[in-house]
Image: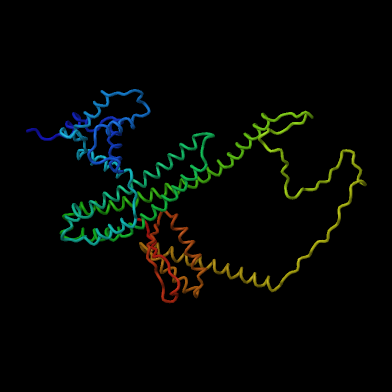
Amino acid sequence: MDAFNLYNEVKQEYNNLLPNKKVMLVIFHLYQRIENKELDTTFTEDEILKSIKYVRRNEIKTEQTEQFNQTIRSLQKFFLWRDENKGVYSFRPYAEQLCAEVAKVLSDTFNPTEIEKDFKHIQTQLDVESFDMWYQYTSFDGYRRKVSAQTSVLDRKVAKAITEFRTEINQNDDYNISSLKNIVDILSGLGEQTRELNVAFRSSRQIEDWMIDFQKEEKGITYFKETADVIQYFKYIRNKLQIIGRKIDGIKPKLDEYINNINQQDFYRKFKLLLKYTLENAQLNKSGEMCLPTNIPNECILPDKLQKFLIIKENWNQEQIPLQRSSKVAVPTIDKEASSLELKRCNEQSAMFKRVKQYLEELEYQLNTSKEVDFSMCFFEVMEKEHGDVNAAVRFASRAMEKYFKSKAHQIEIQKEKISYSLYPTITVWKTTIYKRT
């Protein structure tokens, strides 16, 4: 017996396994109707004909019975079972699996919370004695497929949003401002989702450290290729998410600027259209005066305050020009006490800015000498140095987040875990760690 050859088998059955677009859409339409409970899992030939006619509704002009029957017969090889006795049809396993997989790919949206739970699960299941089982069967392989799918969904959504924006702006005068703004909002939401997914990967470094230590053991040498694969995979995903994040951060300001320009152009375009319409449809009345079109109200709109001008004719006489009334210049009174307090406040603020700059330099030094810094504790250390002044600590945090979020050499991870400090029990911050990129 000849060995199974996938290529040869697919080549022979390709048209039956993957029919043309119109035929495949009939299968997807039937599947959707079953999922929506419009059809039972068994259905009649009339129901198949309804789906065929729906898919081809824009091209069918007459009843094409023979062609419809040919389509139904072709689907029976891999997609549809036919019960000869009852005269009903149902999906074959191949059709169910194919439709379900396509539906999953197109509808997948990630849930960072679920991914984080899965991550904790594979971390707790990790064991030296059962590493082979962990890697191939129980935990990592399934988790990898799930995360790869979710990352692919994010990347596809970003690409789709950008494509839709380009399509919209190529419509010349037919663009829709609301649609453009909606696309920008979608990109903002995807950026937030990317950051949340990054947070869900915060434990990946712990697994990487475990792998590195395992590689040094005698048993770990046997699985060096597998452990290297795990390490490389997590680095790949983090890098992919960073690329998606940078893509969003890079395109969104440009889109915002483009929308601002379009708003301005839209105003001038509408103004020109109004002016053109008014001139083309204006009419002369019996007195020879130009009148606005009948559907534009003939009302004079004046500002609340009218500016008074002095009109000087060509042959003017200086003596005829009325003298302007002189007005007394009001000399403001100076409140010395208030001025002193304001000067003191400015000096204190300037001194605080200098101290915040010093705290940022100290943070930079820590990042240069270690792989990561617990920023939550840095925040409370600044609070203590500032004797409880939260303003300085908040400014320090704001400057640090702005700097390292944009940094290509560092990465910020924020966990939904509140951290407090014994000296200031009423103040809590999210657990935040700044990493030095490898």
Relative to 145, is 424 on the left or the right? right
Above-or-below relation of 290 to 378:
above
Relative to 224, is 382 on the left or the right? right
- Seen as rendered, the residue at the extreme left is 1
Image quarter (top left, top right, bottom left or bottom right) of the N terminus: top left
**Quadrant of the rendered image containing residue 261:** top right
- Seen as rendered, the residue at the extreme front is 86
Task: Residue at 49% x, 65% y: name it.
Answer: 396
**Quadrant of the rendered image containing residue 349:** bottom right
What is the count of numbered marks? 0
Task: Residue at 36% x, 23% y: name it.
Answer: 61
Q: In the rendering, at what x and y percent does residue 127 appear?
A: 19, 61
Above-or-below relation of 46 to 241:
above
- Seen as rendered, the residue at the extreme right is 319
Q: Nearer the viewer, residue 282 or 347?
A: 282
Q: In the rendering, at what x and y percent does residue 176 appear?
A: 51, 39
- Seen as rendered, the residue at the extreme bottom is 423
Image quarter (top left, top right, bottom left or bottom right) of the C terminus: bottom left
Q: In the rendering, at what x and y percent does residue 15 appear?
A: 23, 29
Task: Residue at 26% x, 43% y: name it.
Answer: 100
The colour scheme used to paint the residues is rainbow
Q: In the rendering, at what x and y percent does residue 131 appear?
A: 18, 57
**Quadrant of the rendered image containing residue 433:** bottom left
Q: Nearer the viewer, residue 393 or 320?
A: 320
Above-or-below relation of 429 to 283:
below
Relative to 189, is 225 on the left or the right? left
